[in-house]
Amino acid sequence: MRHVAMAEAHVWTRGSDLEEPRRRAKRDVVEELRRTRIVGCLRMRAHTARARLLAMDATRAALDAGLEAFEATLDSPHAVDVLQRIAESHPHVLLGAGTANDVRRVSTIEWKGLQFATSPTRAKETSTWMAQEEEHVLFVPGVATPTEARTAWCEDGATMLKVYPTRRETMQALRDVMPEAVLMASGGMQVEDVTEMIGADAHVVVLGSALFDLDDVASGNTRRIQERVRSAVRLAEEAGRKVAERNARRAELWEGIETRDSCAAG
C-alpha cells in the first residue's frame, strides 16, 4: 500500500495565500498536465533588467502560440518575478518552478500563483517541505532508474515522476516496472522527439532550449519561438491520439485481467 513517508522538517511561515482563481487540487494539476502534454521550460542566464524583459516577451509569445504549461528554473535570474507576472496576466496557464531540488532556495520563494514544481532528483527533503508548507503545489521528483521511481512513487507518495535524463529505453523500462506511474520526460530533447517520447508512454514532455533557444530569447526572435511551440503542440496532439487508440486496444485485450499494484509487488 502506498504511503507518504513523513520526515521532520523545519517550519517556515508564509504570509500570503494563493489566489482562488489559480488554486487547483493537485490531482487536477496532474490531469491538466497530462492533457496539455507539453511543458515549456525557460532557463535564463543574464541578470540585467533587459534580460528579464526579453524573458517575459519570450514567455508571452510561447503562451500566445498555444503553450498551456510553463516553468522557469529556480537557478535562473528573475525566475520568480517572471512566474508571478505570468500568473497575473495568464490566469489559466499552468505555472511551475523547475530545478526545485534545493530546500533552502525552495523555502524562501513566493509560491503564490504556482501549481507545480519539478526537480531533477528525488529531493526528499524538498518533497517533505513542500507537502507540509505548500500543500497545494504538485511536487514532481526526478528519477533515473526503476528503483528510484519505485521509492518516490511508493514511499514518498509522488503522483507524477520526472524521468531525467530521458531516453526511450529508460521510459520503457520504467513503464514495464511501474505501469501505473505518471511520467514526465525531461532533458535534452528536441521538438521532433515529442512523438517518440509520447509513443514511449511519456504522459508529459518538458522542452527547454528546444523551444526557448537562448539566442532567440536574447535577440527577441519570438517568431521562431512560436513556430517551435506550434510544432511541439501539433506533434503532441497527433502522438496523443495514436497512444489513446493503442491503449484502447490494450484495454480490450486485458479486459477482465486483474492488474498488479507495483508498490505491493515488493
Image: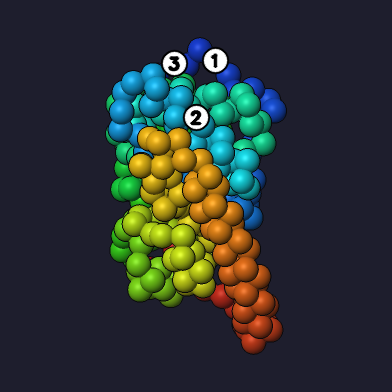
Residue toward you, 231 or 118:
231
Query: Quarter-wise, where is residue 149 in the image?
Result: bottom left
The residue at which mark 3 appears reads as 13
Q: Residue flagged by tag 1: what amino acid is it?
A: Ser
Element under label 2?
Answer: helix
Element under label 3?
Answer: loop
Report the number of discs: 3
Q: Please provide percent x and percent y for residue 134.
A: 49, 29
Give the answer, above or below, for where 168 lies relative to 70.
Answer: below
Q: Please provide percent x and percent y for residue 162.
A: 41, 53
2 or 1: mark nearer the eye:
2
| Residue 264 can be seen, yes or no | no
How many residues crowd mark 1 within 10 Å: few (<14), some (14–19), many (20+)?
few
How many residues crowd mark 3 within 10 Å: few (<14), some (14–19), many (20+)?
few
The residue at which mark 2 appears reads as 56
Q: Residue at x 47, y 71 (%)?
A: 196
Q: Please provide percent x and percent y for residue 46.
A: 31, 28
Q: How far apart are marks 3 and 1 (CA)?
A: 10 Å
3 or 1: mark nearer the eye:
1
The residue at which mark 1 appears reads as 16
